[in-house]
Image: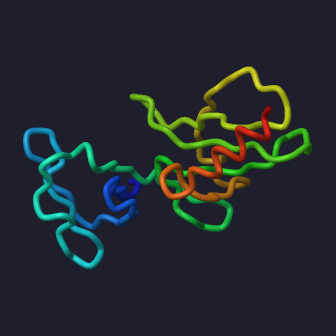
């Protein structure tokens, strides 16, 4: 059975926190207990200020856990550079969304599988490192 883990991005404080316990009320995020067992914040009034991200159950080539929202760098099969993708959930499975490729790609999304982490490296995430997305998009122009 795969590990179920979460992390949370606070839009207001622009901070990422690991989650040890979460609570919901009527389908809305109610509280998060961080790794220090502190409620962050005490009783959310607006769960739109928070982004909950799930662990995919996989690790990158360096052993770093891969979460939803992470940015991955993977060598292209052509050897002409690196492919940059982000990790997303699309109702049924994890997918890699193409951000940059040194070669023409026909698909915007790729299946995310057990083999993904073998050659890939987590280089950041879309919340703490948006500049990585901008740099990659500029390279593709």
Residue 115 versus residue 27 in the image, above or below = below
The quadrant holding residue 8 is bottom left
The residue lying at 38 percent from left, 58 percent from top is 3
Can residue 6 be seen in the rendering of this structure? no
Where 135 sits versus 104, above or below?
A: below
Q: How many marks?
A: 0
Residue at (8% x, 46% y) in the render: 25
Q: Nearer the viewer, residue 95 or 18?
A: 18
Q: Residue at x 82, y 42 (%)?
A: 76
Quadrant where the C terminus is found in the figure: top right
| Residue 68 picture location, percent across and down | 46, 47
**Tell me, what colour scheme is on the image?**
rainbow
**Residue sitting farthest toward the bottom:** 36
Left or right position of 61 against 94: right
Residue 126 to residue 101: above or below: below
Apparent side of residue 81 relative to residue 54 in the rendered image (left or right): right
Q: Is residue 129 rendered to the left or right of residue 120?
A: left
**Residue extending furthest top?**
106
- Percent position of residue 109, x then y: 61, 28
Compared to 27, does 106 lie above or below? above
Query: In screen coordinates, is 18 left or right of 85?
Result: left
Can you give x and y, in whole percent of width and height, for residue 59 in the image? 57, 59
Residue 80 appears in the picture as rendered: yes
């Amino acid at each position: 059975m795969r590990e179920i883990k979460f992390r949370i991005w606070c839009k207001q404080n622009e901070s990422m926190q690991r989650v040890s316990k979460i609570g919901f009320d009527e389908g809305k995020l109610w509280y998060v207990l961080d790794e220090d067992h502190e409620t962050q914040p005490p009783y959310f009034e607006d769960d739109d200020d928070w982004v909950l991200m799930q662990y995919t159950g996989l690790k990158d080539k360096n052993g770093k856990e891969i979460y939803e929202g992470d940015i991955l760098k993977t060598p292209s099969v052509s050897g002409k550079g690196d492919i940059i993708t982000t990790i997303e959930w699309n109702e049924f499975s994890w997918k890699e969304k193409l951000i940059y490729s040194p070669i023409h790609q026909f698909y915007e999304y790729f299946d995310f599988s057990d083999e993904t982490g073998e050659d890939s490296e987590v280089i950041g995430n879309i919340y703490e490192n948006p500049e990585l997305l901008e740099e990659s998009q500029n390279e593709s122009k």
